[in-house]
């Protein structure tokens, strides 16, 4: 029971339904009380424990419908129920009490031929007496379903991820069920030109078809979430300038997902204070020892002071793709980040913070790239930055610069970078180029590096997430 429930919870987690260990234990208690007999009760009980938002409840219902449909059939099946179709009596066939005309006229005549052939072949008789063939011949769907589920568990079908694995798992399950004995029997009947060959081939094909259908259902159930996770992993490690256009909407969703995770991790925490909002739970607990009289009150308060972040992004050429996602990342974290002022540059620099107030973030980034894109001049851009923001930089300021530092052999204005370095709490430079390329050609990165507290190669979302995580730690106001 617990293994089935844990498999179901794993499927939900693969589809971005957040389930904590405590909620998993609650679900186990619910299943222990409700059991699997009443499908509606089980759905409602698990939904209350595992799904919290309307979107999660919709995902839960979809997964529940597919996962527990067959499981409930197995648990509620009546093992004593008569089969839908009974094979002819073996003794009657062996004694010749059923004529060839009678066999041909009856629906189960082909089975009678198969049974008759088994009288002269001990191996075929042993095969027909086995549980697998008995279930096939009697069309015992519940028993076959249970056997398929058990075989699927033994071969690890829940781990299926790629559609190319369907054939592999189909063969593994067939081997686990003992289908090779049917194949061997088919070969022997074919050698002997037996009239029972076609019927045994029919049962073999029925078994294969049922296993293929079972694997297909399980693939659709288990692989969808894993495929999404696999695709997210690939996209997060791919250089941003290599992403094809039709993947961009997926990357935007992935950025928001990463930002949401970081927001939950670094959300501002309340601290004890002498004023602010009354902490009722702590105050009441403290009064228990005094018969509920609240002699001592406790307060909670969020600190209002915030440091500021200045994001300076090169939007020239291929670097624009990296700047786009850095800005998207930063503005997806508005609830937990301190104040962010954004600047964009190529040959000249300007503040673009108001774009994010007046337009949706994607539209704002598009307009910024259009306005400030062009040939790169780091020296002139640093001069513009100094006139706009140098006086605002203090010990609470973090400056993030994203660019490749390729200055077209112009004056790097290193003295401005040194002035920023001396004033700021930290200067972080993110370079989308490989470290091996720093300082080559017209790159001034090694010179700028001396005026930075931290420099890093950053060309994919995974690296960007890790750096923003460190940034949030260093600017925490908890």
Image (tube, grey):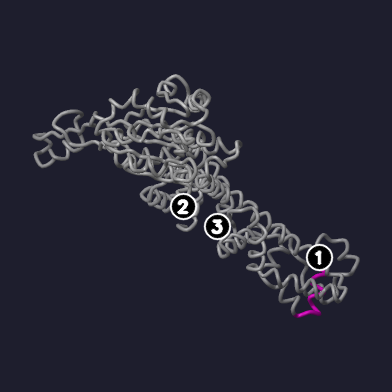
Residue in view at x 33 percent, y 28 percent: 339
Q: Give the labeled residue for mark 3.
A: 159
Q: Quadrant of residue 77?
A: bottom right
Asked if residue 112 is among those painted magenta in the image, a careful observer would answer yes
- Whichever of labels 3 and 2 marks the residue nearer the N terminus, that label is 2
Q: CA distance from mark 1 to mark 3?
A: 35 Å
Residue drawn at x 67%, y 59% is: 167
As drawn, the residue found furthest toward the top would be 358
- Residue 32's place in the image compared with 122, above or below, is above
Residue closest to the eye, 225 or 245: 245
- Marks 1 and 2, Cα distance to the nearest angstrom? 41 Å
Magenta segment's dominant SS is helix
Sequence order check, earlier mark of 1 and 3: 3
Mark number for residue 35? Answer: 2
Tell me residue 96's x, y (percent).
Answer: 86, 75
Of tags 1 and 3, the one toward the viewer is 3
Question: Do labels 3 and 2 touch, CB within 8 Å?
Answer: no
In this picture, residue 264 sits left or right of residue 88? left
Secondary element type, mark 2: loop
Image quarter of the C terminus: top left
Nearest-to-viewer mark from 1 and 2: 1
The span picked out in magenta is 109-122
Check the image and report above or below for 293 versus 236.
above
Residue named by callout 1:
199
């Amino acid at each position: 029971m617990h293994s089935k429930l844990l498999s179901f919870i794993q499927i939900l987690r693969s589809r971005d339904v957040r389930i904590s260990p405590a909620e998993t234990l609650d679900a186990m208690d619910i299943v222990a009380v409700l059991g699997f007999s009443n499908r509606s009760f089980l759905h409602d009980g698990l939904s209350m424990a595992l799904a919290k938002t309307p979107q999660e409840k919709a995902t839960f219902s979809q997964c529940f419908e597919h996962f527990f449909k067959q499981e409930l059939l197995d648990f509620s099946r009546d093992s004593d129920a008569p089969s839908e179709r009974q094979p002819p009596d073996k003794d009657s066939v062996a004694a010749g009490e059923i004529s060839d005309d009678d066999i041909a006229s009856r629906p189960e005549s082909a089975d009678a031929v198969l049974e008759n052939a088994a009288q002269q072949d001990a191996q075929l008789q042993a095969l027909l007496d086995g549980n697998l063939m008995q279930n096939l011949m009697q069309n015992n769907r519940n028993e076959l379903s249970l056997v398929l589920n058990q075989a699927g568990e033994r071969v690890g079908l829940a781990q299926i991820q790629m559609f190319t694995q369907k054939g592999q798992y189909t063969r593994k399950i067939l081997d686990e069920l003992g289908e090779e004995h049917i194949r061997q029997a088919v070969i022997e009947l074919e050698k002997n030109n037996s009239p029972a060959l076609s019927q045994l081939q029919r049962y073999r094909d029925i078994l294969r078809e049922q296993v293929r259908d079972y694997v297909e259902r399980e693939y659709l159930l288990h692989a969808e979430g894993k495929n999404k996770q696999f695709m997210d992993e690939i996209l997060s490690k791919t250089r941003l300038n290599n992403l094809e256009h039709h993947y961009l909407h997926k990357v935007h969703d992935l950025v928001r997902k990463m930002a949401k995770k970081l927001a939950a991790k670094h959300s501002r925490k309340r601290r004890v204070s002498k004023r602010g909002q009354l902490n009722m739970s702590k105050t009441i607990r403290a009064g228990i020892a005094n018969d509920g009289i609240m002699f001592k009150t406790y307060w909670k308060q969020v600190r209002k002071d915030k440091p500021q972040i200045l994001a300076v992004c090169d939007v020239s050429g291929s670097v624009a793709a990296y700047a786009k996602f850095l800005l998207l990342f930063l503005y997806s974290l508005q609830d937990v980040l301190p104040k962010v002022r954004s600047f964009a540059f190529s040959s000249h620099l300007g503040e673009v913070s108001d774009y994010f107030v007046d337009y949706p973030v994607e539209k704002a980034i598009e307009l910024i790239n259009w306005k400030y894109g062009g040939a790169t001049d780091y020296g002139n851009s640093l001069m513009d930055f100094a006139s706009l923001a140098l006086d605002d930089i203090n010990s609470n300021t973090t400056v993030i610069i994203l660019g490749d530092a390729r200055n077209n052999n112009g004056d790097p204005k290193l003295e401005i970078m040194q002035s920023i370095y001396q004033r700021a709490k930290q200067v972080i430079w993110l370079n989308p180029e490989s470290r091996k390329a720093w300082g080559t050609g017209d790159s001034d990165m090694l010179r700028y590096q001396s005026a930075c507290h931290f420099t890093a190669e950053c060309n994919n979302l995974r690296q960007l997430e890790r750096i923003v995580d460190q940034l949030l730690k260093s600017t925490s106001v908890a």
